[in-house]
Amino acid sequence: MHLTQFSDYSLRLVIYLAAHPERVISVEEVSRAFGISRHHLVKVVQTLTDLGVVEAQRGRGGGMRLALPPSAINVGWLIRQTEPHFHLVECFDLATNTCPIAPACGLKGALSRARQAFLSVLDEYTLDQFLRQREELVTLLNHSLGQSPGSPAAHEP
């Protein structure tokens, strides 16, 4: 199973926002913290805003925060919303399938069950369960931003 970069960035973004609930966060800050493209991140923010997961404010003093409590964000649901498809192999997409053995192959059924098991496990988690080590997350994120333990952002509650 391989998630797209879009889903990866979506998960990183919501974790970052959940780790900093006391303030509005800029796209630039998240981009720097994870070393990811600001351009890609803007697309992620737009999608998560459309889904009602993130609130975004434009302009001076703008930024983003979670629109829902972390306990209300189901990880399996989020992945289903951010993945364009779950075609593990070519034959999962009937429109583009050229595999000559597809009608008689048993692999598709096994892979379909594995995909469902993968998503079922993710359905058991909400975002708040990934924040059990929030202080350590914030410390690591501050370090990735080049902030020392004595900087103002490092003293967040």
Image: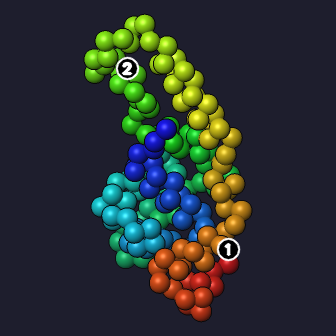
Q: Residues within 10 Å of mark 2 (few under 14, many from 20)?
A: some
Residue 25 image point, x, y percent: 48, 71
The image quadrant of residue 16 is bottom right
Q: Nearer the viewer, residue 55 or 12?
A: 12
Q: Which residue is mark 2?
A: 91
In the image, is 139 to the left or to the right of 101? right
**Residue drawn at 61 percent across, 70 percent down:** 137
Q: Residues within 10 Å of mark 1 (few under 14, many from 20)?
A: some
The image quadrant of residue 66 is bottom right
Disc 1 versus disc 2: nearer the observer:
2
Q: Amino acid at mark 2?
A: Cys
Q: CA distance from mark 1 to mark 2?
A: 45 Å
Q: Amino acid at mark 1?
A: Glu
Name the disc covering residue 120, or none. Answer: none
Residue 145 image point, x, y percent: 47, 79
Q: Secondary structure at mark 1?
A: helix
* Vertical comparison of 2 with 58: above or below: above
* Vertical comparison of 40 with 116: above or below: below
Q: Secondary structure at mark 2?
A: helix
**Residue drawn at 67 percent across, 74 percent down:** 135
**Residue drawn at 67 percent across, 61 percent down:** 131
N-term-proximal mark, 1 vs 2: 2
Residue 113 image point, x, y percent: 57, 23
Name the disc covering residue 135, or none. Answer: 1
